[in-house]
Amino acid sequence: MNIDFPPPSKGTYNNAGSSRKLCNYLEHEDMERMEQGIYTEGFFNLTNDNIYKSQVIKDIDSNIGQLMKTDAKFYAIHVSPSEKELQAMGTTEQEQAEAMKRYIREVVIPEYAKNFNKGLSAENIKFYGKIHFSRDRSNNELNMHCHLIVSRKDQTNKKKLSPLTNHKNTKKGAIKGGFNRKNLFQQAEQGFDKLFGYQRQLTETFEYYNTMKNGSISEQLNMQEHQISDERKNTDMQTGLYADKQDEPNENKVVYKQDDNLSNDIENKQSFNLSDLGLSSALGLLTPEPNNSDEEQQIPMKRKKKKPKRGFRQG
């Protein structure tokens, strides 16, 4: 699951003024799909669907109490599942869209609220979401993702909330609380797995991605060891299930012997590329061919029949 906060800009993501430009952008896909008679999704919030764009702009632009002219009035968030995650969310675009709204309402926004460490809940966050079904510059078949517009102020228009602050759970000074983005990413990932029963591989986790991108060399090598261990366990599980399906006990013994060789071979042949570090590691082990001498059967030699000696029969 990829969650990111697009940085404010002078264009679409300019958040110092009205949210109108961003809302207009979020509706551009609807026009194309409507012309083709394809299913579309309107804006939604914590409790309602198909909210008009005019209502979204009005609510976000009016919730700016005590903010200066140059202050951020709202923030944008992208929530983008992988193809495998989308497959776990449904088989049709409508099923996936409904699952996405549920995920935003039950996991993302509640975790977003808790991350400010101010005793907030999902009901305190003023936000609107918009689902898109395609993504520019992507060759994936499944590309559904969600755009969120989150107000800088809470529902009461009193508390300032910034997910881009560098403060993390501070208890002294002008800013109390803060925001831990890494914690949000991890909690949202775990919440997704629990909500949809998703079996996440190590290489799909935020921890793996963050370590391989930002970790030290020792941390990256340690993560590689975890990956090898996990892949070996998966291989052992798969081969064990295969062995259980065999009918004959003798065949099972042969399968287990082959599986041990296979898992050792896979473990030893794992290789990893660290393009950013210019490092690579490769382990290889040549497995000797099995000796079939014991399986060869000896063919017994045929005895030649003795020919009777020539002579005279005695009468």
Image (tube, grey):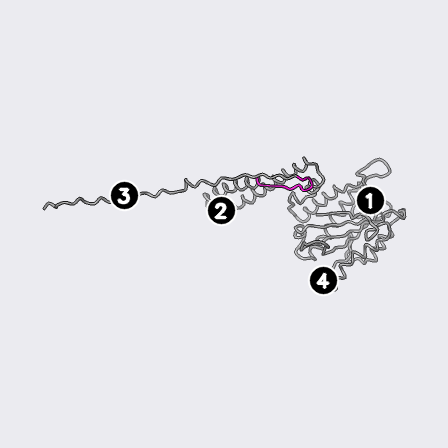
The residue stretch that appears in magenta: 268-278
Report which residue position mark 4 lands on. 38
Spatial CA span between label 3 and label 4: 86 Å
Left or right of 311 on screen, residue 44 = right
- In contact (CB < 8 Å): disc 3 and disc 4: no
What's the mark number on residue 314? none
Mark 1: which amino acid? Answer: Ser
User: N-terminal of the two: label 1 or label 4?
Assistant: 4
Q: Is residue 33 magenta?
A: no
* Comparing labels 3 and 4, the label whose residue is closer to the camera: 3
What's the mark number on residue 246? 2
User: N-terminal of the two: label 4 or label 2?
Assistant: 4
Report which residue position mark 1 lands on. 162
Spatial CA span between label 2 and label 1: 59 Å
Q: Find numbered disc 3 in the image and state the secondary structure of the residue it sits on.
A: loop
- In contact (CB < 8 Å): disc 1 and disc 4: no
* Residue depicted at x 49% and y 41%: 257
